Image (cartoon, rainbow, N blue to C red):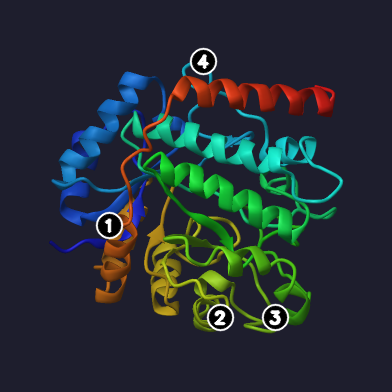
Amino acid sequence: MPRGAYIFAPSGPELGSREARFFSEAEPFGFIMFQRNCRSPDQLRRLTAALREAVGRHAPILIDQEGGRVQRMRAPHWREWMPPLDQVDALASSGGVSPKAERAMYLRGFLIGTELLDHGIDVNCAPCADVARPGTHPFLKNRCLGSSPPVVTVTARALAAGLTDAGCLPVLKHAPGHGRATRDSHEALPCIDASLAELWETDFLPFRKLADLPMTMTAHVVLPEIDPERPVTLSEAGVTYLREELGLSGLLLTDDISMGALSGKVESRAASAREAGCDLVLHCSGDLSEMSAIAAAVGEMSSSARRLADIAFSGRTSPLDVDICDFEAEFAALTQEAKENAGW
């Protein structure tokens, strides 16, 4: 069955008849949830079921449930999490990579993945493999998993493994690295002026080491040595660099195509992203007129994108059979230790 090369978001907590008809006709590859879509456990389960019913298949449903500032499912119905960077730093050891931080991120991934699957969500847009720096914009900084490439690599791998063991696919982001950006790409286009030689051993390192993960999200950033005019998401040279140099061979989706970093009509941006080589276009606002324009401009997934999607989702495993209470207790102890170390 043909599938559109786009991922769309519903506008609210219930699926209206007009949206349902549109999704049935447009056949998006999948959907993504936001806080506006997550009111209560039963409501969210109804929504994810209704979205799949609209397209007549078990479509992937994504969410950004990083924990900390970026989590769409929040208290009082769902668990609140420490910001990733705060938890990793608070469990850090003087030797660099901390076994406690690594274990905490694995457990965090497993518990988040378990919670998501219980509500019909099977893909989490995490981990962030961006390396935090003193100048990293606040929109991103405490969402990072560390301030050095080795720490980020290990903790991101652990978080991805936890999600995978829970039966939830991880999405590596934001390739090839957003940590040096001093602008919020939701509002303006960042330009990273560091040389590729420097970036290769720093910001690019976690992405190179995690290139085997099944899905990756692009960054809306300009790297002048690759393409001085277009952000990676819209640049054929940028996407080629991700694929051929960094080795990111999995399913490649854009960050939200409606973000302020990009200019022009959303349908033009979406078409440019596909022409550049992105497999899927992500659109998050829930605006039906924009989704309709994107569907018309982008069309169906390519045969190579369908193949990569099949590989990604065929690799999904059944949840690991564990005593979830033991995992929760262990994670709670590590979180309490992190809070005490951080002076919370």
Q: In the drawing, does residue 257 fall left or right of residue 153?
A: left
Q: For the residues marked 4 and 2, what is the alpha-carbon distance in whole angstroms?
A: 43 Å
Quadrant assignment for the N terminus:
bottom left
Q: The disc labelled 4 sits on which kind of residue?
A: Pro
- In the rendered image, residue 51, in percent from the top left (x then y), is placed at 24, 39
Q: For the residues marked 1 and 3, what is the alpha-carbon distance in whole angstroms?
A: 37 Å
Q: What element carries label 4?
A: loop
Rendered residue at 13%/46% (across/down): 56
Q: What element carries label 3?
A: loop
Residue highlighted by disc 4 = 76
The label nearer to you, 2 versus 1, is 1
The crowding category of the residue bearing disc 2, from other C-alpha atoms within 10 Å (few below 14, some 14 to 19, many at least 20), is some
Q: Residue 314 carries which label?
A: 1
The label nearer to you, 3 versus 2, is 2
Would you identify the image quadrant in which residue 150 lies? bottom right
Residue highlighted by disc 2 = 241
Say if 255 sits above or below 332 in the image. Answer: below
The crowding category of the residue bearing disc 4, from other C-alpha atoms within 10 Å (few below 14, some 14 to 19, many at least 20), is few
* Sequence-first tag of 3 and 4: 4
Q: Residue 224 carries which label?
A: 3
Q: For the residues marked 3 and 2, what is the alpha-carbon distance in whole angstroms?
A: 13 Å
> 149 or 296: which is nearer to us?
149
Q: In the drawing, does residue 56 fall left or right of residue 220?
A: left
Rendered residue at 30%/56% (across/down): 313
The label nearer to you, 1 versus 3, is 1
Q: For the residues marked 2 and 1, what is the alpha-carbon distance in whole angstroms?
A: 26 Å
Q: Can residue 220 be seen in this view?
A: no
> 50 or 210: which is nearer to us?
210
